[in-house]
Amino acid sequence: MHNEKGLVAGLMQALRCLPGVGPKSAQRMAFNLLQEDRTHAKTLARALNDAADKVGFCGHCRTLSEHSLCSLCSNPARDRSLLCIVESPADVYIIDHATGFKGLYFVLHGRLSPLDGVGPQELKLDLLDQRLQTGEVSEIILATNTTVEGEATAYYISEMAQNRNIRSTRIAHGVPLGGELDYVDSSTLSHAFTGRQEM
């Protein structure tokens, strides 16, 4: 019996790694997965295992992908002159489904935060600079979060673009100061995207 308790407690603890999942939510999820029909639990376990093993990062934009190039970067219909800069792969998904944006993306996987040891090198801004050097990009759209670090990151990247004579704009209207894109509704985000301003 001790081992069973250990396994259930272990599952609850594992579920707490998810954002917004506290002890009570983890407990409800664990019991829900283990009660009655365990088909859903086994399906979830397989999906997690497969994704953990097979999903990497796109070699071009750095979003999550099962292939060396994601479906967006490999799509010839996308506008390669527009490059949207975001903090996370989740932002790519959110923007692409909420705004009708038809350009490409570059995922930073974070934001500049010198106190946390996150500088240009950690965000792979050298790779971004290489893309800007090709002459293919005519505008970058800065869609970093409106936190202090997100704003500093946007400013830094806009300077990079300016040095290459590339237009840089920033999403604006309707995104609250200090807000994160994950929590902004799609109509507000769409309005923010179309109302972007010059940096």
Image: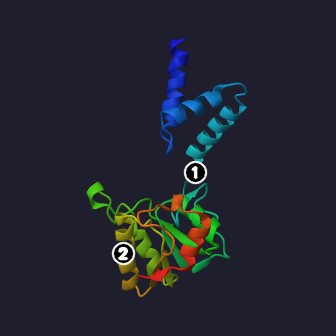
Up/down of 26 relative to 135, above or below: above
Residue 114 locus on image (x, y percent): 28, 61
Q: What count of labels does the image hold?
A: 2
Residues under numbered marks 1 and 2 in contact, where contact means CB atoms less than 8 Å apart: no
Residue at position x 50%, y 82% in the image:
139
Residue 196 locus on image (x, y percent): 51, 79
Q: Where is the C terminus found, in terms of image quarters?
A: bottom left
Which label is found at residue 2? none
Q: Quadrant of residue 90?
A: bottom right
**Left of 21 or right of it: where is 75?**
right
**Callout in the foreground (1, 2):** 2
Q: Nearer the viewer, residue 77 or 154?
A: 154
Residue lying furthest bottom in this view?
165
Mark 1 and mark 2 lie on one chain; the one further toward the N terminus is 1
Q: Nearer the viewer, residue 145 or 136?
A: 145
Residue lying furthest left in this view?
115
Which amino acid type is shown beneath numbered disc 2?
A: Tyr
| Whether residue 89 is visible | no
What residue would you read off at disc 1? 55
Up/down of 73 relative to 134, above or below: above
- Element type at marker 1? loop
Residue at position x 53%, y 22% in the image:
7
Q: Residues within 10 Å of mark 1 (few under 14, many from 20)?
A: few
What residue would you read off at disc 2? 155
Q: Quadrant of residue 4?
A: top right
Up/down of 165 relative to 5, above or below: below
Residue 181 locus on image (x, y percent): 51, 62
Q: Quadrant of residue 187?
A: bottom right
**Left of 156 or right of it: where is 42?**
right
Residue 56 locus on image (x, y percent): 54, 53
Which amino acid type is shown beneath numbered disc 1?
A: Val
